[in-house]
Structure formats: C-alpha cells, structure tokens
Amino acid sequence: MLDPRTVRTEPDAVRASQTARGADPTVVDRYLDLDRSRREAIAAFEELRARQKQLGRRIGPAQGALKRADAADRDQLQREVDALLSEAAGLADEVKAAEARSAALQSELDEVALDLDNLVDPAAPVGGEEDFTVITEVGEARDFAAEGFEPRDHLELGSRLRAIDVERGAKVSGSRFFYLTGDGALLELALLNLAMSLATRNGLTPVIPPALVNPAAMAATGFLGQAAENVYHLQDDDMYLVGTAEVPLAGYHADEILPAEDLPLHYVGFSPCFRREAGSHGKDTRGIIRVHQFDKVEMFTYCDPADAVAEHDRLLSWEREFLDQLEIPYRVIDVATGDLGASAARKFDIEAWIPTQGRYREVTSTSNCTTFQSRRLNTRFRAADGTVAPVATLNGTLVAMPRVIVALLENHQDANGDVRVPAALQPFLGGREWLRAPQ
C-alpha cells in the first residue's frame, strides 16, 4: 500500500511508476477521485454528527423544563420538545446515510488502492523482462566440447542417479510434480543444512512457518493482484497455499509496533511452496525447472526505511555467498521495472548457468519492498523520539531447491554421468565427493 499522502501530493510520480511497470496509470486518477469524495463524505458526516450532538444537548433540558412546567406553559413546551425530537429523528437518518456513504467510499477506495503497485526505485532499469542490467558475472561456463563429451541435462542425470522421478510424480499428482529419491532427497537436505548454516552464522533467526495463510496475509504481500492466477486457493476454507515463505514471514509481525532498538530483524524460513504456473503452458515442461510444488529457503528483513538499501545489498551478498560455495557460474542482474512484482521497488536476481540450455536461469532473487507491505499489514516501529512509522520489509531467496539442484547436476557432471559434490556440501553428505549411479 502506498502512503495516501504520496498519491495526493505526487500523483505524476505514481503515474510514471505505474507506466514504468507496464501497469495502468489511470488508476491514480480513480484513486484521487474516490479519495476526494471520501474526504468530502467524512466532512459531511462529521458536520451532521456535530449538529446531532448539539441538538442532543438541547433535548435534555427541554424535556426537563417540560416536566417542571405548569399547565399554562405545558402545551408550548410540548410542541418545542416534539419539534426537537422530530428534527433529531430526521438528523439521525441523515447521519446514518452519511456514515454508510463514507464507509462505502472507503471500501471502494481500498479496492482501488490494491491496484496501485509500489513506487519503483529510480535506480531500477526501465523496461520489460529483457531490459535488465547485468551487475556482475561470476565464474566461467565449462567447455564440455573441449572435455570431449556432450553434457547430459538434469533429468537424464537425475534418472541415472535415481535421484529424480517425474514419471511417478505425474502418475500420483499430475504434470509438473516430481519425487526426489535417494541422493536427490539427500542433496536437498544437504542444501537446506548448508543454507541454514550460512543464515544462522550471519545472525538470521530460523523459522518454519505455516504453508497455509488467510486472504489478508496473501493480499498484503501483493500476491492477489497480478500474481493471483498462480496462487492455489482452498475455497472451502478460504485459505491460500503459499508460493513463498515471504508471505507468512511478512505477516509474522502484523499489527505490531516494533521497538527501534530491535531493528533490523532478520528471519530465514524453510517451507514448501505451491504455484499454479498458469501463464507458463509449454515452457520448461521437461524436468524440474518449472513445477507446482517445491521447497525453498527464504530470508526476510524488517528494518528502518532509512536502512533498506543497505539491507538489500546485505541480502544479495548472502545469496552470492551461498552460490559461491556451490561453485556454479552465475550472474547478478538488476531486474527491469516491467518485471517487478507489485510489492518490489527494486529487485536483484541471481541466474545460474545451465549448460544444456546454454543460458542463465533465475535461481534466487531479493526484493526491497520499502514500506509497501508493512502499510497493508500495519507493521510499524517506534523511534527513539516516540514517533511511530511503517517499517521497511525486504525478502531474499537463499535457495529454491529444484533449480539449484538442476544447476548443480548439470555443472558438476563428468563424462560418465556422475556428479561431483562441491566441497561446501560434502560435510552434509557424509563426506562424499561424488554422486554416482547405484550399481
């Protein structure tokens, strides 16, 4: 949610941000019209309420005077009391109608406000999905031709190692589901332990959050707008399966005021994630790159908005530290405005090199959501001077299991189809240096 004062005082900046995202800029004008009507309705309601209170102060004394009056004055006083009561009844109807109009306009304004995305950071590159800026590239892609063999893709490797089973996943659950078995399951657990080890070493608090959340939590984090088609909704319960631990971690401190001295708060959550992938028919249907269910380790930060940019860089550094330990070539990109989620002001992606595709693919991302989510969730902090203001929230994926497994298998394979285990992962795999096919 944007600060209403920002929309009122800087409408051109909000329109420009919407345009840069490829979103509808005219929603700003609808918002302003409704906001103006709502404020006028509130003023009218308050004026009527003031009149009603003033009238109420007259009725009591008039009724008292009527009780004390002698016969000569009683008829006149009765007419005055009746007139006041009649006016009060009419005014009560007007107050009720004004209150209902104000509430209806507020509800309509709240709905329109959901169509206003966060203000994009001026430093973010403007454009669509392909208009990102490359910040850095790390490592070099292996020259498999020079090594004398054609690399196998992750699915062939996973089948050979008996680590990935998509056929039985499809039999039990349908397309884009899979089993991790044997070394595949152990590899995920090793990645989880390596990620949690890195996170706790850097002071993050581990959390295993709920994977089901209420509509308020899902809407507040921006996943019921443009991303709604990819969300699983349990209609009978009116609950949502999360697509990322960002959602329950963002809701963790909803309706709370955090002491400034406690900030920043750093959490790292591990959860299953569920995505319909509704807009990706025909894309990445082979293997486990784009699936409906997967596990993910997600970092989440609450901080003073003045520290948000520095915290964003910190999240990115932890993501890079993790990828460096996996010895996988990758690049970091500054995501263009048209490819940002509704909540993100700026977003950095890390893309790992996938040899059989000859391209980089996203494996982690980190977003600075400024105060957009916290305003919706009513999460604030109290500064040293006693003032209360919304916190900034940031999120960052430390490891999304399937894609990192894909990158590991493909980048560390040998000519026999065995897979070398990076040194950092070996302690979590019993010291093993290689994943080999069962004999």
Image: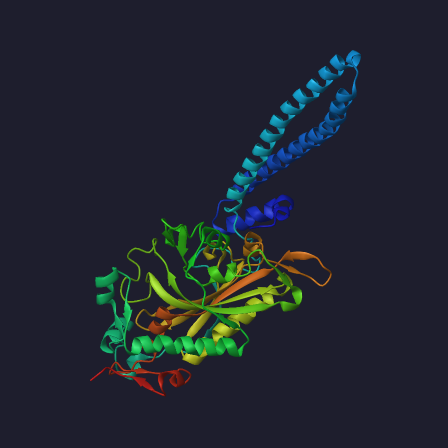
Measured from the top left, where is residue 338 in percent x and y? 47, 54
Q: What colour-coding does the image apply? A: rainbow
Q: Is residue 189 visible?
A: yes
Residue at image location 75% in from the left, 20% down from the top = 66
Measured from the top left, where is residue 50 in percent x and y? 71, 32
> Is 62 displayed left or right of 138 in the figure?
right
Q: Nearer the viewer, residue 199 or 125?
A: 199
Whether 299 is drawn above or below 418: the answer is above
Whether 200 is drawn above or below 254: the answer is below
Residue at image location 63% in from the left, 23% down from the top = 90
Whether 237 is drawn above or below 81: the answer is below
Q: Is residue 139 visible?
A: no
Q: Nearer the viewer, residue 201 or 277?
A: 201
Residue occupying the far top of the picture: 72
Measured from the top left, where is residue 296 in percent x and y? 41, 68
Number of numbered tags placed on the structure image: 0
Q: Nearer the viewer, residue 241 or 28?
A: 241
Measured from the top left, where is residue 256 in percent x and y? 59, 58
> Is 115 displayed left or right of 433 in the figure?
right
> Is 321 displayed left or right of 7 in the figure?
left
> Is 172 displayed left or right of 67 in the figure?
left
Query: Quadrant of residue 40 in the image?
Result: top right
